[in-house]
Amino acid sequence: MERIGADAFEEGRLKRPGNWIVGFLADWCPYCRSFLPYLDALRSLDGLGVLLADVTDEGSPLWEAFGIDVVPTVVVFRDGTPVYRRDGRLGRGLGAEDLRAIRESVPHG
């Protein structure tokens, strides 16, 4: 899965056209490591790209730009604009039920 940094975004927008699921994950987070296979499973959806926004560095501007308080956090973008967001929960992260909600949020057409 492709890792991206702050340079892939501009003013809260992803600099790529199309439908993208972006997982904001940190290497030091055990819940992020647990969620990675779920995020990878989303790559099977047609017409959708999946990216990993690396926020391992707690000084990354992505924390503030997207108001991230907990990782993992997933944002769905359509033509650069965020259209859906699912935030992890402290002490729990994200799991299978979140994966279903993310799949259902993917824009069609």
Image: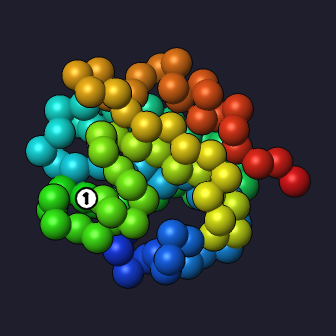
* Residue that appears at 35% across and 74% down: 6
User: Where does the image place residue 104, in percent across and percent down from the top left?
Assistant: 70, 32
Residue 55 spot, x, y in % from top left: 25, 58
Q: Is residue 83 left or right of residue 89?
A: right
Nearest the eye: 48 or 29: 29
- Name the residue rendered at 61%, 28% in the picture: 101
For the residue marked with disc 1, what is the amino acid? Val
As drawn, 26 above or below 70: below
Toward the viewer: 60 or 98? 60
| Residue 98 to residue 59: above or below | above
Residue receiving disc 1? 55
Q: Residue at x 12, y 44 (%)?
A: 28
Please identify the residue farthest to the left as the structure is shown.
28
Considering every residue shown, the one lying at the far right of the view is 109
Q: Is residue 30 visible?
A: yes
Q: Within 10 Å of the Cα at label 1, are there few (<14), some (14-19), or many (20+) other Cα atoms?
A: many
Quadrant in the picture for residue 57: bottom left
Q: How is the image coloured?
A: rainbow
Residue at 60% of width from left, 75% of height from top?
16
Q: Secondary structure at mark 1?
A: loop
Q: Quadrant of residue 65?
A: bottom left
Residue 109, above or below 79: above
99 relative to 101 in the view: left or right: left
**Image quadrant in which the C terminus is located:** bottom right
* Residue placed most toward the observer, 45 or 19: 19
Question: What x and y, as percent, mark residue 22?
Answer: 48, 54
